[in-house]
Amino acid sequence: SLLIKSFHRLFEVNPGFQTERLVTMRIALPANYDSDETVNRFYRRMIERLSALPGVRGVAITSRLPISGSDGNGDIAIEGRESAPGELGATTFHGVMPDYFGVMGIPLVRGRFLETRDEASTLRPVVIGESFARRFWPGIDAVGKRFKVGPRDRASWLTIVGVVGDVHQIGLDSSAAFSTYDLLIDVPSSRFEIAVRTAADTGAVMPAIQSTLRTLDPSLLIDKVQTKIGR
């Protein structure tokens, strides 16, 4: 039937990241994490503790994982290019920690990934998706180019340091949107999502992951625990 054919087509869609051996979940910190410093300290402690678990190959933190909806978006303005508000479309915006792309298996196309040295940089380094780069800088290198997202009179210029493969952020049945990634640590949130890449069976590592999180803080709100995304 048409429904079955459509279903099988979804399984043929490349989501833009490696879906196997991945434990994901959403976390909300309690109210006592009331400053950027306390939230960022928790990020670092969590990555350190989870990364040390047997069978864990890497830990990623992001404002929103792929195939789970958009982080919101804003109008695009390209430096040196005249355009009316909304004319160039919009880009989704995702906060990520530096290891995000490696852990998720999102390929680098040009330039580099975000790094710890980019924290608090006045250049506002960002990474964008390949479709975004191809649309606005066809045939030339987008690395080093600048653009704004949101109200033009208030938004800061963002500097592209890398281009990555497109990722299906909303769902496999939706085309990959223009994507922008910046450092989560510069705009930390007490609500975030994590992905833990395992060396083997995710089920064997899951109890240790959850136990470690409870040891870090028993007041954490943890939900949407999954061992695969979008499949």
Image (cartoon, rainbow, N blue to C red):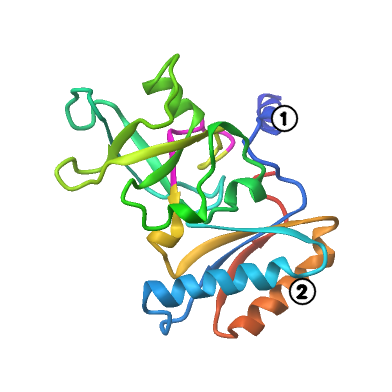
The quarter of the displayed image where residue 24 is located: bottom right
> Of marks 1 and 2, which one's residue comes earlier in the chain?
1
- Residue 182 in the image: x percent, y percent? 43, 49
Between 210 and 183, the one lying in front of the other is 183
Residue 176 lies in the magenta stretch: yes
Q: Nearer the viewer, residue 63 or 59?
A: 59
Q: Is residue 183 above or below residue 172?
A: below
Magenta region's main secondary structure? Answer: loop
Q: Nearer the viewer, residue 37 or 117?
A: 117
Q: From the image, tell me which residue sits under label 2.
A: 208
- Specify the farthest residue to the front: 117
Q: Is residue 18 magenta?
A: no
Farthest-out residue, top: 139
Image side of residue 6 versus residue 219, left or right: right
Q: Which residue is mark 1?
A: 8
Residue at image position (43%, 17%) is 140
Q: CA distance from mark 1 to mark 2?
A: 34 Å
> What is the span of residues highlighted in magenta in the rendered image?
172-181
Indicate the position of residue 30 as horizontal and vertical percent values: 46, 81
The residue depicted at 42 percent of the width and 85 percent of the height is 32
Q: Residue at x 65, y 40 (%)?
A: 17
Secondary structure of residue under mark 2: helix
Give the secondary structure at mark 1.
helix
Q: Nearer the viewer, residue 209 or 228?
A: 209
Say which residue appears at 80% left-offset and 66% top-offset. Answer: 205
Quadrant where the N terminus is found in the figure: top right
